[in-house]
């Protein structure tokens, strides 16, 4: 489990409808899955807070437009 925790590139905090209370948190180790989940939540207007650990992502991965 520790090795998986070391590979976490970010997580999404899923918020309550008022945007204040964190309902649950999902960590991600895969950039593409992370990106897709963020876009999916944005598409339906789900209140989330994505948290990214850029130092854990391969150099240039986000800057290359993978998350935009």
Image (spheres, helix red, strand yellow):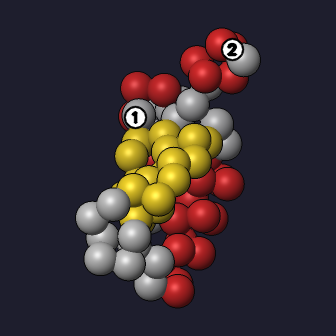
SS at mark 2? helix
In the image, farthest residue toward the right:
1
Q: Is residue 44 above or below residue 15?
A: below
Q: Quadrant of residue 28?
A: top right
Q: Quadrant of the C terminus?
A: bottom left
Q: Name the residue rendered at 59%, 75% in the picture.
A: 40
Q: Which residue is mark 1?
A: 54
Q: Is residue 39 above or below residue 11?
A: below
Image coords of residue 25 (percent x, y):
51, 48
How packed mark 1 is, by other alpha carbons closer than 10 Å (few <14, some 14-19, many 20 or more), is some
In the image, farthest residue toward the bottom:
44
Q: Name the residue rendered at 62%, 65% in the picture.
A: 36
Q: Which residue is mark 2?
A: 3
Q: Quadrant of the N terminus?
A: top right
Q: Is residue 53 above or below residue 66?
A: above
Viewer-proximal residue among 61 and 50? 50
């Amino acid at each position: 489990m520790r090795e998986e925790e070391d590979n976490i590139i970010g997580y999404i905090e899923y918020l309550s409808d008022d945007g204040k209370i964190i309902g649950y948190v999902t960590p991600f180790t895969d950039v593409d899955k992370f990106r897709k989940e963020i876009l999916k939540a944005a598409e339906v207007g789900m209140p989330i807070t994505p948290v990214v650990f850029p130092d854990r992502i391969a150099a240039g991965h986000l800057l290359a437009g993978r998350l935009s």
